[in-house]
Amino acid sequence: MPLSIATWNINSVRLRIELVGKLASEHQPDVICLQETKTPDDRFPLKDAARFGYPHAAIHGQKGYHGVAILSKRPFESVSRQDFCDMGDARHISVVLGREAGLEAPLAIHNFYIPAGGDIPDPAVNEKFRHKLAFLDEATTWEELHPTAPGARSILVGDLNIAPLESDVWSHKQLLDVVSHTPIEVEKLAALQAAGGWVDVMRNFIPPQEKLFTWWSYRAADWAASNRGRRLDHVWASPALAPAATDVTVLREARGWERPSDHVPVIVRLDV
């Protein structure tokens, strides 16, 4: 059975809810995972989501900052949220799709918004960077992210705020000291990936030697011409689920939509 999942840092869901509708109408993903929704749960535009064809919603938000949500055409078997570093930030939500969603075996979806980390890549002087590293360490030890049991079907998506490969940034040399591509961040993200045996699904379809970006700064006068992007958004699958992926699409054109997010959606399609 085909299943498509989109992940997108929307950068304020209330401001850009019609762009969510555009994604829904043009690409019809079964599930949409959003990050940086920037709204408390009681102000999330649930009626709009239902209007777009997503009557099922799992939301974890807070006023003005962070926030994650999973919108779905299919019902959830369960919903859970995890707080990392005792910060109270809304940075994770997960759901399980089961028989009511038409699946013969359960499939868990983890949606993450990992801290950006500020501007200075030194945990001794930058609390935001220290928080990012601690978040990654804690996530690495969290057993829910170790789907290594035979047949365990899990997918992890979201704005992980790290571009791990040299080809995930416009200039490896110039960004080595820039938060999101520093060696310590890359090392910790690799540890998180290894702890769960996660497969980088995007790079299964787009060779690691090819440039691949999902984010372009608002600061660029012409983002398309300069093309100084980074791959901050990721799709990982458990070893048992990874072979079910049939396609990955990065909607680069969404960066040119009216009042866009600085991130673009990524859609993974699976045969489950």
Image (spheres, grey):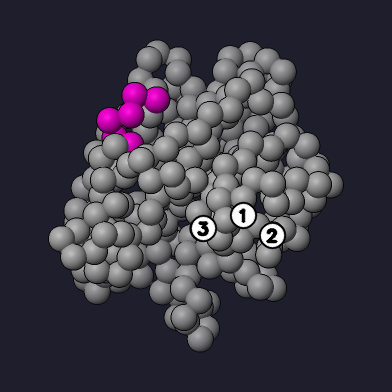
The answer to which of 40 and 146 lies nearer the viewer is 40
Kind of residue at badge 1 = Thr
Which residue position is annotated with label 3? 65
Say few, some or many: other residues with alpha carbon within 10 Å of mark 1 (under 14 / 14 to 19 / 20 or more): many
Label 2 crowd bin: few (<14), some (14–19), many (20+), radius 10 Å? some
Residue 58 image-quadrant placement: top right
- Pinpoint residue 47: horizontal percent, then vertical percent: 81, 47
Looking at the image, the residue that sits furthest to the left is: 124
Picture disc at residue 237 = none
- Inspect this view and state whether residue 264 appears: no
Q: Secondary structure at mark 3?
A: loop
The region drawn magenta spans 139-144
Badge 1 vs badge 2, beta-carbon distance below 8 Å:
yes
Q: Secondary structure at mark 2?
A: loop
State yes or no: residue 241 in magenta: no
Q: Quadrant of residue 151?
A: top left
Q: Amino acid at mark 3?
A: Tyr
Read off the residue under disc 2.
14
